[in-house]
Amino acid sequence: MISHHLDTIKKIGILGGTFDPPHLGHLKLATHFAKILHLDELLLIPSGEPWQKESSITPAELRFKMTEAAGVDLAIEFLQLNIPTRISTDRIEMNRPGPSYTLDTAKALRERFGPQVNLTWLMGADTLLNLPTWNSWDQLLNYLNFAVASRPHHSLSAEISLEMKVLLEKHQCIDADALAKSPFGRIYLDNSLSVDLSSTQLRDQLKSLARSTIASEHIPSHALEIVTNLDLYK
Ligand SMILES: Nc1ncnc2c1ncn2[C@@H]1O[C@H](COP(=O)(O)OP(=O)(O)OP(=O)(O)O)[C@@H](O)[C@H]1O
Ligand SMILES: O=C(O)c1ccc[n+]([C@@H]2O[C@H](COP(=O)([O-])O)[C@@H](O)[C@H]2O)c1
């Protein structure tokens, strides 16, 4: 009876990022969590004003277009893998003026979807390590769960701060199912991903002569079309 009720709770995953540009690391993260968390929906949310990034980032509208295009590649992958999660790219942070604070987004999504749904913010290990620098970070778990994927060069065990240890002691759950049962307030650490890719590395590679060969292996094809057509990152 109880488990039947829990199975009917809607599960929404959120992948926020600068996406400058989107890459296969983002797609693998999304695919992995869509599968193991049995997500009904996945929102890709390009940050409007990523206040911790350099000022030289690509304009938000172009990053949105690339993210939306990457969403098409992701949808094709989901179809091939029989993952029923619906994907959308959301303007919520682009429509809000000022620095993009995740807490504002979390509150707005909670309003939009209601108190019952499972809202889970997907992230790589680097993001969890950086969390204590975010605006009002200690309030985020009142609205969201966190699903955290391992990422090369960002070791949680080696780099974790004392405040993050305290947070994990209080909120960490043992498996993906436990997280899926709670609308907010849980952290699940997952060790199965190891994708050695970053947007920074790709932007550097796109400046080089071997631009097209390198990029096509690591940037989803519809997003790469925009990069190529607009000659981005040269
Ligand atoms: N290779 C990866 N493995 C696991 N998580 C990743 C990977 N790449 C990005 N992510 C996660 O995706 C989210 C959005 O990342 P973002 O758009 O900043 O990409 P990035 O590659 O980290 O960019 P940059 O190199 O510009 O910092 C973050 O939570 C980040 O941890
Ligand atoms: O809320 C904050 O202060 C905050 C600070 C840094 C990053 N974030 C969010 O974290 C997500 C990943 O960020 P980034 O910088 O790795 O692209 C993205 O959705 C950002 O808006 C949020």
Image: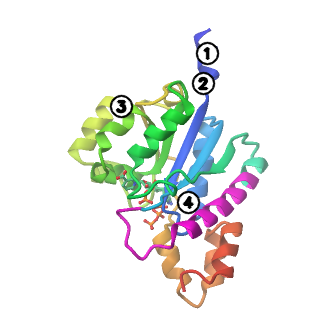
Please report whichever mark, 3 or 2, sits nearer to the chain's N-terminal start: 2
Please report whichever mark, 3 or 1, sits nearer to the chain's N-terminal start: 1
Which residue is identified by label 4? 25
Amino acid found under the numbered disc labelled 4: Gly
Please report whichever mark, 2 or 4, sits nearer to the chain's N-terminal start: 2
Judged from the image, the secondary structure of the residue bearing numbered disc 4 is: helix
Residue located at (28% from left, 53% from top): 133
The residue most toward the left is 162
Q: Distance between the residues labelled 3 and 1?
A: 23 Å
Q: Is 84 drawn above or below residue 154 in the view shown?
A: above
Which residue is identified by label 1? 5
Amino acid found under the numbered disc labelled 3: His
Per the rendered image, the range of residues in magenta is 50-76
Residue 146 visible somewhere in the drawing: no
How far across and down, in percent of the image, does residue 158 sit? 29, 52
Between label 3 and label 2, give the one nearer the viewer.
2
Is label 4 within 8 A of ligand 1 (CB to nearest ligand atom)? yes
Residue located at (54% from left, 88% from top): 208
Residue located at (76% from left, 54% from top): 76
Between label 1 and label 4, give the one nearer the viewer.
1
Answer whether labels 1 and 2 touch (C-beta < 8 Å). Answer: yes
Residue located at (66% from left, 68% from top): 223
